Image: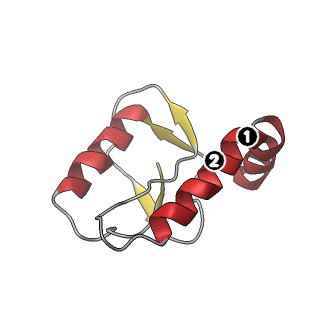
Amino acid sequence: MNRVGAKMFEWIYSNMMTDKKREWQILSSNTLIKWTLIRLPFIVDGAEKGSIKENLLDMPGTRITNQDIATFIINQVASQEYVQKSPFISN
């Protein structure tokens, strides 16, 4: 499902996807700043579910709530776990 969505985005939003690939090239070659690029599935407006799946290689689910995204971001401020990395997250 995620791969189909990604292909649709590449086709419908080709300029945006080109920019996202360039963004990745710039970040991944920069060791002078601390960065984390969070990759998301479909975002659902809703309450925090409290369970966030994380994976560095593949999207672990198809949806995530906006409140869980916020919680994940806040937790990364004090964490070194994903510095210079690009985790996928979902519920």
State the image coordinates of residue 23 (x, y, percent, origin top left). Answer: 54, 55
Q: Residue at x 38, y 42 (%)?
A: 69
Q: Residue at x 73, y 40 (%)?
A: 15
* Disc assigned to residue 15: 1
Camera-side residue: 3 or 77? 77
Q: Which sits in the foreground, 15 or 86?
A: 15
User: Is residue 49 in sight in this rendering?
Assistant: no
Name the secondary structure under disc 1. helix
The residue sitting at 46% across, 48% down in the picture is: 91
Where is residue 30 shown, x and y percent of the image?
41, 70
Residue 6 vs residue 57: left or right? Answer: right
Residue 32 image-quadrant placement: bottom left
Would you say 70 lies left or right of 41 here? left
Residue kind at label 1, given as amino acid type: Asn
Q: Amino acid at mark 2?
A: Asp
Q: Are marks 2 and 1 in contact (CB under 8 Å)?
A: yes
Judged from the image, the secondary structure of the residue bearing numbered disc 2 is helix
Q: Which residue is mark 2?
A: 19
Task: Mark 1: give few (<14), some (14-19) or many (20+) Cα within 10 Å.
Answer: few
